Amino acid sequence: MHNYGVTNVLTTEIQIEDRPWTDPQGAHLRCEQRAEIAIRYGTDDSEPGVKPTAADIAEFVVAYIDGKPVGCGGLRELHGEDGDAEIKRMFVRSSNRGSGAAVAVLRALEERAKKRGWTRLLLETGVAQPDATRFYEREGYVRVPAFGHYKGSADSVCYGRTLPRE
């Protein structure tokens, strides 16, 4: 378990745990994310890319506040793209947004990517998620051309960040 020391006056410290993709708490958070996305896009199937699975998610973390799961995120290696990985299923419950949990999850994913030797993280979000685009831009991610399965998707907005060397 990693403690990123992120605190908020209303919460205690955020804990980040490495979990398997199949972890029940992580699966529940991902279901919440998909439900929120379905409402925003008006469809249960708005994902233009290949859905992540236990077979292709190399890293998956869950964030906890006061022992309760509040957010998650995963990494999938992008084959054919030397040193690139994709952030998948990055999510924080709406009631915990602004707590620092999203930053803690993102930094944990970046740390794990560097340990694997990956040098750049890419991600796809969408036009109906302006809060996500603001978050990623604030955290140093820049717009990049659509990649992989997202090429040609009118709803996709892609970002990337070259990870700083230690």
Image: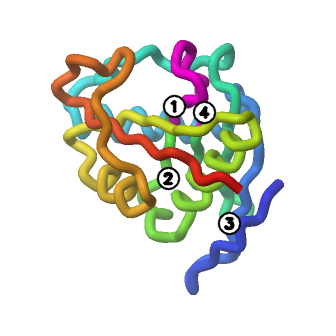
Q: Earlier in the sequence, mark 4 or mark 3?
A: 3
Q: Residue 75 carries which label?
A: 4
Residue 157 is left or right of residue 110, and the answer is left
Q: Which of marks 4 and 1 is nearer the N terminus?
A: 4
Q: Which of marks 2 and 1 is nearer the N terminus?
A: 1
View extreme (left): residue: 154
Residue 69 visible here: no
Q: Earlier in the sequence, mark 3 or mark 2?
A: 3
Q: Distance between the residues labelled 3 and 2?
A: 12 Å
Residue 139 position, x and y percent, is 44, 60
Residue 35 position, x and y percent, is 38, 35
Residue 58 position, x and y percent, is 69, 27
Crowding around mark 4 (Cα neighbors within 10 Å: few <14, some 14 to 19, many 20+) is many
Q: Is mark 1 on a helix, strand or loop?
A: strand
Q: Which mark is residue 92?
A: 2
Q: Is residue 126 above or below residue 104?
A: above
Q: What residue sits right under mark 1 in the picture?
A: 86
Q: Which mark is residue 14?
A: 3
Crowding around mark 2 (Cα neighbors within 10 Å: few <14, some 14 to 19, many 20+) is many
View extreme (bottom): residue: 9
Q: Which residue is drawn at 54% across and 68% down?
A: 100
Q: Which of marks 2 and 4 is nearer the N terminus?
A: 4
Tell me the kind of residue under disc 4: Leu
